[in-house]
Every structure is written in structure tokens, then in C-alpha cells.
Image: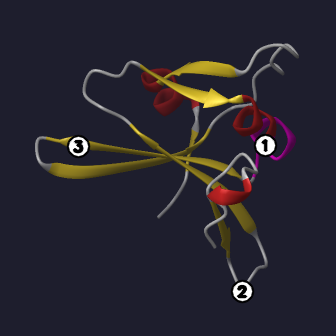
Amino acid sequence: MERSAEQLGYEIESLDPSSGWVDFINGVVVTDRAAKIVLNRDEVLVGLNDPEQFVLALVGFVGSKPQLDSVRPRPGDCPAFEQINVALDVVELLENGEEVGR
């Protein structure tokens, strides 16, 4: 279910009807030149509060072919109260995050 208009810190709520498991998916476009992606405070807090359910769907292109990598980032530190976003290294996310099956 698409939930981005509600600004919950994720864009898609995905329910597995057989198990009742819900994933909170946040789509991020990754370009060839992007070494980092930026998550806002709400996105970071969802990842910290529900680490087993928070999924980053990294969408990019290799040439003209689309590529999707879905990972559960490892929980980090809570951002300082005044911090409004966090930059994450894409290579580090892919190496250290838990790959999510498709």
C-alpha cells in the first residue's frame, strides 16, 4: 500500500498475507555518481524503531538496464534532535546491510 503522502518515514507498506509480516519500504534512486544517499529524520527513526521491517529499495541503472537492490540497513545511532537528515554510504549499505529477497 502506497503511504508516502502520510509522511511516515517510508513510502510503501508491504503485507505478506500468509504470515501477516509487514515491511516498510523506502525507495531511493541511486545514480552512477552517487556515493551517498540521504535519509530524512523520519526515515532514520523508522529504521531505528523497526529495523527488521525497514527496507531500503535502492533503484539505479547499469547502462540502460534498471537494477534493484533491497537491503535492511543495520541500525545506527539516533540522530541528534536538531539533525534533519543523515547521509549513508551506498557501498557500505550494500556490503553491511542484510539483503532482502525478492
Instruction: Identify the secondary structure beneath mark 3.
Output: strand
Disc 3 marks which amino acid?
A: Phe
Which residue is nearer to you in this view: 82 or 102?
A: 82
Badges 2 and 3: C-beta atoms under 8 Å apart? no
At a point 52% along the width and 29% down the height, the residue shown is 93
Which residue is nearer to you in this view: 62 or 79?
A: 79
At a point 61% along the width and 68% down the height, the residue shown is 2
Q: What is the distance, in whole Å, between disc 2 and disc 3 at their CAs?
A: 33 Å
Q: Mark 1 — residue?
A: 46
Q: Quadrant of residue 84?
A: top right
Pick whichever of labels 2 and 3 is earlier in the sequence: 2
The magenta segment is: 46-52
**Residue 43 is one of the magenta-drawn residues:** no
Q: Mark 3 — residue?
A: 61
Q: What is the distance, in whole Å, between disc 2 and disc 1 at their CAs?
A: 24 Å
Q: Mark 2 — residue?
A: 18
Instruction: Identify the secondary structure beneath mark 2.
Output: loop
Which callout, 2 or 1, points to the residue nearer the camera?
1
